[in-house]
Each structure stands twice: as structure tokens, then as C-alpha cells.
Amino acid sequence: MSDTRCYYEQLRGRARHLVTRIDDVMAELLSVEAAVEEVLQADMDNPGELSTTDSADLRQFVEAAQFSVRAAERIAVEHVNDVDRAMQRLGLTNGNKEGIRAVE
């Protein structure tokens, strides 16, 4: 295996690992969002103990984190696709489309 192929395969593997880790973070943030909603509800769907301001702030911070992770995911996915295109240009792939798409 050529040094160039080895380099690009490592680069692609690392980039894909990053996308996977970002996906894991998003899944955890969705779990956090559900937990926040549970905290904001008391028995019988009455308002919970958090103040209205704290409740809104908590929701806003979780939403901001999700927004940031989605932005990071788009960057990471584009990096994977860039590496795949570079490998195709250099003739280092078998021609399969191996790109990754961002979750919308």
C-alpha cells in the first residue's frame, strides 16, 4: 500500500470517526432535551419547580447546543466528502460513492 493511500485512508477513518462521535453527541442532546421536558413537568402535567425564566433559559441552552452540534456535523461531513473526492481524484478508491450526508 502506498504512503499516499495509507495517509488518505487514515484521514478518512479519522474524519468518519469524528462524524460518528458528533452523531453520538446529538443523540445524547436529544436525551437531555427529553430529560429537561420531564423536569419542567410535575405530576399531572402541572408546572414544575423551576421558575419560568430558568425553564426558558434551560430550553434555550439545550437548543443552542443542538444548533452548534448540527453546525459541527455539517463541517465534519463536508470534510469526509472532501477526503473522499480527493481519494477519487487520486485514483485511491474503487469508484464507489462513499460520502456521508448530514442529518437534516
Image (cartoon, rainbow, N blue to C red):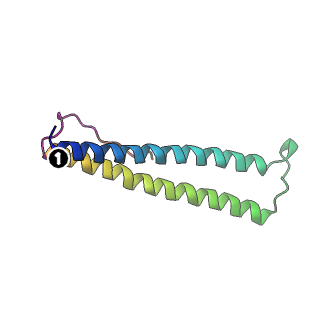
Q: Quadrant of residue 53?
A: bottom right
Identify which residue is drawn at 56% across, 43% down. 27
Indicate whether 48 appears above or below 97. below
Q: 23 or 44: which is nearer to us? A: 23
Q: What secondary structure do most residues of the magenta stretch adopt?
A: loop
Along the horizontal axis of the image, is 10 left or right of 49? left
Query: Residue 58's spot in the image, x, y percent?
Result: 70, 60
Range covered by the magenta-colored residues: 90-98
**Total numbered badges shown on the rendered structure:** 1
Identify which residue is drawn at 33% across, 42% down. 13
Along the horizontal axis of the image, is 55 left or right of 5? right
Identify which residue is drawn at 72% across, 48% down. 37
Identify which residue is drawn at 52% across, 43% down. 24
Q: Quadrant of residue 92?
A: top left
Classify the position of the N terminus by image quarter.
top left
Which residue of the protein is positioned furthest toward the bottom in this rendering? 53
Q: 73 or 8: which is nearer to us? A: 8
Indicate whether 17 appears above or below 56. above
Query: Residue 45's spot in the image, x, y percent?
Result: 83, 45
Examine the structure image and report whether residue 91 is included in the region drawn in magenta. Answer: yes
> Helix, strand, or loop for circle 1?
helix
Along the horizontal axis of the image, is 32 left or right of 12? right
The residue labelled by disc 1 is 4
Query: Residue 65's spot in the image, x, y percent?
Result: 57, 58
Number of other residues with Cα within 10 Å of mark 1, as a class: few under 14, some 14 to 19, many 20 or more: few
Examine the structure image and report whether residue 79 is included in the region drawn in magenta. Answer: no
Query: Residue 71's spot in the image, x, y percent?
Result: 45, 57
Q: Identify which amino acid the numbered label 1 is placed on.
A: Thr
